[in-house]
Image (cartoon, grey):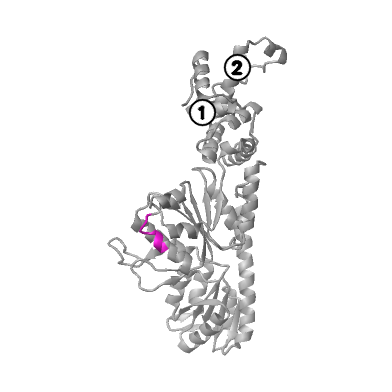
């Protein structure tokens, strides 16, 4: 990932020499001539290191150093001066500068110092970002199902690549959690992660969010705006629901992916940017390409590394593990630590088909935590959700003792059949066709049994 240095000096020859030297060593250089320009560029570009001349036309290093340290204390600042003064050196070091160097400086010596500071700063940023994030980071691979183990194996293989990743999965299945894991555990984990949901955004609003705009670019553009791509420089851009991106914006995104360049609205010059794209969608993008709702060239570019997140109903054996993890987090967040689920409640959660996936599961557990008054969540605590109540209506209440083997022997064949059909229907969310397949009988036969037993279901 290309690193960026801000060179602040009022002498054009000095700026030219430093730019030429650092660019030859693979470092991007941004130039400023005054304290005012240095402030603006530091805020807008957040360089990895600053080379700051002590005396400038509109002030000294002492005028800008405190602001730079306040904005981002992790950015090292080297102060250069042709007027060596012990007092000045002491003052700039007190204000947070790394070194105070006399001009002219030998470039090879300066490079050794700069390279060491850049490496240390990058390591420090990455460690800080990962330490701050891991405490709340959700594990996208909870469970032991084959589907989730295969997903984890594939995700780990693509971690170190800079190629775009396309995450496909149903709404609420955890695409954002997986995107965050890919960012934090990859080489860009110390950089920014910028997220944007493309669903429902008008083309102009989507463009200005992604690329930014210059003042006067359109009627309401009264100030310059930095786009998310610039904010994500040397990090990751996560575009959720990319399948809903307007066709007018898609070719501009393709240019960013292919050329690493973009242009703000109202601007005439291109800007370079270094980002990794992670995209997500619940749509079938291949079908969207066939129906001309999504560009073919962009689809092939973003789907270099495809990942598929399985729905919860496709891995029911993972649901208890996920539910316990979510409950532990929610109970801490809501001030009720130590909550647990009864075995019957866990069985009910596993039987429910979860059309809203992880998002729905979290919602159900959060409401149960807020509404329950006991330290153990029972099946009844989950039944405020009417759809769930209907799906689980066949589950035996927890207050009743389980039917013993001897008692089961007293059941009639019709009663045994009824109970089994009820359990299968509950597991399939009341869906007759899926229940029939699970029972191994034709759908028409199941309809007849439902009618004869007085049961109802979702078609």
Badge 1 local density, few (<14 within 10 Å), some, or many (20+)? some
Q: Which mark is residue 257?
A: none
The residue at 48%/68% (across/down) is 273
- Does the segment drawn in magenta span residue 251? yes
Residue 369 placement: quadrant? top right
User: 304 and 51: which one is in front?
Assistant: 304
Q: Is 220 placed above or below 27 here?
A: above
Q: CA distance from mark 1 to mark 2?
A: 18 Å
Looking at the image, can residue 431 be seen?
Answer: no
* Residue displayed at 56% across by 31% down: 352
Q: Quadrant of the N terminus?
A: bottom right
Magenta segment range?
246-252
Q: Can residue 339 be seen at all in this image of the molecule? A: yes
Locate residue 194 relative to residue 327 in the image: left or right. left
Disc number for residue 433: 1
| Pointer 1 or 2: first along the chain | 2
Picture coordinates of residue 453, whole percent (x, y) = 52, 14
Task: Decide: is 261 above or below 55.
Answer: above
Count neighbours of disc 2 (C-alpha within 10 A) and say few if under 14, some if 14 to 19, many if 20 or more: few
Disc 1 element: helix
Left of 62 or right of it: where is 246? left
Residue contact between numbered discs 1 and 2, judged by CB atoms under 8 Å: no
**Outermost left residue:** 219
- Badge 2 marks a residue whose secondary structure is helix
Task: Pinpoint residue 334: horizontal percent, then vertical percent.
Answer: 56, 39
Q: Residue 79: say if magenta.
A: no
At a point 70% along the width and 15% down the height, the residue shown is: 404
Image quadrant where residue 188 sits? bottom right
Query: Residue 65, percent across and down?
Result: 52, 74
The residue beneath circle 2 is: 417
> Where is residue 374 shown, x and y percent of the image?
61, 28
């Amino acid at each position: 990932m290309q690193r960026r240095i801000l060179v602040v000096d009022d002498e054009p020859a000095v700026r030219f020499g430093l730019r030429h030297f650092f660019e030859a060593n693979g470092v991007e250089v941004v130039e400023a001539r005054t304290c005012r320009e240095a402030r603006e560029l530091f805020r807008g570009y957040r360089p990895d290191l600053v080379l700051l001349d002590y005396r400038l036309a509109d002030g000294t290093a002492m005028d800008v150093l405190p602001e730079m340290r306040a904005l981002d204390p992790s950015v090292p600042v080297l102060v250069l001066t042709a007027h060596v003064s012990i007092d000045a050196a002491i003052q700039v070091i007190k204000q947070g500068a790394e070194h105070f160097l006399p001009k002219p400086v030998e470039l090879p010596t300066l490079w050794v110092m700069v390279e060491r500071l850049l490496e240390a700063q990058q390591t420090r940023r990455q460690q800080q970002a990962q330490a701050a994030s891991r405490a709340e980071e959700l594990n996208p691979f909870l469970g032991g199902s084959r589907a989730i183990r295969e997903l984890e194996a594939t995700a780990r293989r693509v971690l170190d690549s800079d190629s775009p990743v396309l995450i496909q999965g149903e709404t609420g299945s955890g695409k954002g959690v997986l995107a965050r894991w890919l960012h934090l555990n990859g080489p860009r984990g110390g950089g920014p992660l910028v997220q944007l949901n493309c669903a429902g955004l008008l083309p102009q609003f989507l463009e200005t969010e992604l690329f930014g705009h210059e003042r006067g670019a359109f009627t309401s553009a009264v100030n310059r705006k930095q786009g998310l791509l610039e904010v994500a420089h040397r990090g990751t851009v996560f575009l959720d629901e990319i399948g809903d991106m307007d066709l007018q914006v898609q070719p501009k995104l393709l240019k960013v992916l292919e050329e690493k360049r973009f242009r703000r609205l109202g601007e005439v010059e291109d800007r370079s940017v270094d980002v990794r794209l992670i995209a997500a969608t619940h749509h079938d993008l291949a079908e969207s390409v066939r129906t001309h709702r999504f560009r073919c060239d962009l689809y092939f570019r973003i789907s270099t590394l495809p990942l598929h997140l399985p729905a919860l109903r496709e891995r029911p054996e993972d649901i208890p593990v996920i539910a316990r993890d979510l409950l532990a987090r929610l109970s801490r967040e809501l001030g009720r630590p130590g909550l647990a689920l009864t075995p019957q409640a866990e069985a009910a959660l596993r039987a429910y088909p979860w059309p809203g996936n992880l998002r729905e599961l979290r919602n159900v557990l959060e409401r149960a935590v807020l509404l329950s008054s006991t330290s153990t969540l029972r099946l009844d605590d989950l039944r405020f959700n009417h759809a769930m109540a209907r799906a689980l209506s066949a589950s035996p209440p927890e207050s009743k003792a389980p039917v013993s083997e001897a008692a089961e022997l007293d059941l009639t064949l019709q009663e045994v059949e009824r109970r089994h059909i009820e359990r299968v229907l509950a597991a399939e969310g009341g869906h007759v066709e899926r229940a029939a397949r699970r029972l191994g009988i034709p759908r028409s036969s199941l309809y007849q049994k439902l009618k004869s037993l007085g049961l109802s279901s979702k078609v």
